[in-house]
Amino acid sequence: MPTRFATLSLPRRLALLTFIPIVGLLVVGGFLLRTFLSGYRLFEQDLASVAVVRGEIADFGEFYGRLMAERQAALALSAAPASLALREAYRDTFAGTDDAIAAFGAKLNALATAPNAGLFAERRDSIASFFATQIPAARAAAEDGRHSAGEVFNIYLKLAYNGLLRTECYRQIMQTPAGLNFFDGILAVEKLQLQESHAISLVRHGLKQGGLGPDELTILRRQFFASTESEYYLLKFQPDIRAFFKTATRGSDDGAAFYTYLTALAGSQRDGTAFPAFAPKDEGLDQLLADHFAAYPGIYARAYGLSGGQLGELAGQQLRRALALTGALALVLGLSLGGSLALIRGTRGQLGRVAGDIDADSDQLQAASEQLTAAGGQISRQAGFYAEAIERISGSLEEVSQAAEANKERASAASAASARARESVDTGVAAIAEVERAMNSARASGQQITNVISRIDAISSQTNLLALNAAVEAGRAGAAGAGFAVVAEEVRRLAQRCSAAARETAELIGRSSRDNAAAIERVEDLAGRFKKVSSSVHDVHEIAAAISGNFAQQAASIGQINVSVAQQREIAQGIAADARQTEQTALSMETQVESLRGSVERLAAVLGRGADQPPPAPEVFPAVPRRDPALPAPARA
């Protein structure tokens, strides 16, 4: 299939591609149309089913009327079991009940053979079996006289509800939620009628007998509350039917009062209490109850009218949607076919013009690619020359950088040596200062010693004088002072020796002081000379440091120049690579132009134009010589 599609001409391809969404639209529309028609048929089936249910409820009403007559006779007999007249009256109802049960069974048998037999077969067997056993049991209990009225009533109650199961079978054949909702509303009305009938039957029995037994009261309450639940269901899901039911059954004062009476009985009546009577104001109780049950046909008619009307409206909506969808599909189909034909014609013409334009542009593109190839080769060669020049500059800068680095190292060494010399000179200056301070201290000490010797000399002089005085005094003393005179003489001689030693020491210290003063003068002169040397060394160190900094800055600047040159070299290499890439791209463009021309020829063939091509467009770019692809590209630096 793909191969056959590829061989088709463009108009046929467009027609086929346009036909596909139209088919999809028809499929989707057909599905929706089928859905609408199916919904219409389902609502129509529910309408037919509601009509069948109406007939079934009518049949059940006739059957329940016969069964209720027999039940009322059974209640009367249970109140007076010895009455032969009541027994005969009870037995007279058997024939009518048996006929109704037979007709009921025949209808069940007919339903069991219908298309929906599976819905009724099991229910038919259970209903037939229940009636076959419970009817004899009810009659035997009523005639026995040993069973209470509540026990007999409970059997007939079960028979009535068992018969109602036939109507509930039709719930399973409803096709739509709306139909099922309306069926449940009608069934709720039917159950409400049955529940009220049971409750009212017990009330009438209690009024005749003066009260109800425990079993009968239990059944009364159960049925009343069941009717309340059915009425609540109508209020929640079918409020229109419930409103009509309330108006029809409790619209009068007597009807409302009777409902209040039933409520009181179901809620407050206890065993042993007096059974309250009920007396309608406007009419008798029998007439009131007859009118009450006579309202149910109108209630059913209202329920059927609502369900039939709304189901018919829903069916009409589905039918109208189906018709509208059919019209829309027809309109969209017509518009799609017309638009497709117009699109095919317009597309074919536009593609033909586009093919011509592409063919003309391909010539211009080829000329541009040739010029781009030549320009790429020229740029590549110039980039090579530029890279070589950058390389030579880079070599020269490398040599200058090495020389600057060597000068920087020598300047750093000179700066370090001058720093060491400065430190040595500073140390010598400090040592001379220390010597100068020591000699000054020695001079001060010599001066102090001179002073001490002067004092010793003075003491010696005084001691000598004292010794003379002592000798004089010893001479005066005579023999008694002879020993003291010897001592005084010794002291005088000792004082003389001390004075002589002090004079010699003073002379030595004087010579030492003169020598020390001369040394201090020479040390001071040497300290001055060292300070001048230190200042010169400091100046030399600062000059060497400045020279070293200049050489370092020069080396850094040369390094930055080297980085810039390296970047320029990389840029030149990138330009050369881009130029070669541009040249290769231009060659690739030439190949693509050739391929584009082949595509244009194929497009023209698809459009059915054959060799009928538009004239070539004039050249926009001047012709340039093409470089032979076999030649090598310019060498990369």
Image: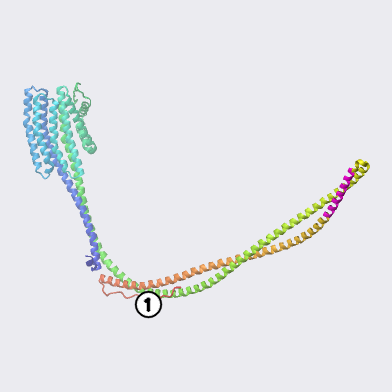
* Residue closer to the observer: 373 or 466: 466
Q: In this view, does 532 lie to the left or right of 54?
A: right
- How many marks the image carries: the answer is 1
Which amino acid type is shown beneath numbered disc 1?
Ala
Vertical position of residue 29 compared to residue 80: above or below: below
* Residue closer to the observer: 139 or 508: 508
* Residue closer to the observer: 349 or 412: 412
Q: Locate residue 99: give its quadrant.
A: top left
Q: Is residue 530 visible?
A: yes
Q: Locate residue 245: give its quadrant.
A: top left
- The stretch of residues the image draws in magenta is 483-505
* Residue closer to the observer: 325 or 507: 507
Residue 127 x/y as whole percent: 11, 36
Identify the residue shown where x is 80% and y is 52%. Answer: 449
Q: Is the stretch drawn in magenta largely helix, strand or loop? A: helix
Quadrant occupied by the N terminus:
bottom left
Vertical position of residue 111 compared to residue 602: above or below: above
**Which residue is label 1 attached to?**
630
Q: Mark 1 falls on what kind of element?
A: loop
Q: For residue 486: magenta?
A: yes
Residue 596 x/y as whole percent: 32, 71
Q: In this view, does 579 lie to the left or right of 94?
A: right
Residue 416 x/y as whole percent: 62, 64
Residue 224 x/y as whole percent: 20, 30
Vertical position of residue 633 compared to residue 423: above or below: below
Q: Is residue 541 left or right of residue 501?
A: left
Q: For residue 111: magenta?
A: no
Q: Can residue 326 be seen in this view?
A: no
Q: Is residue 356 left or right of residue 313?
A: right
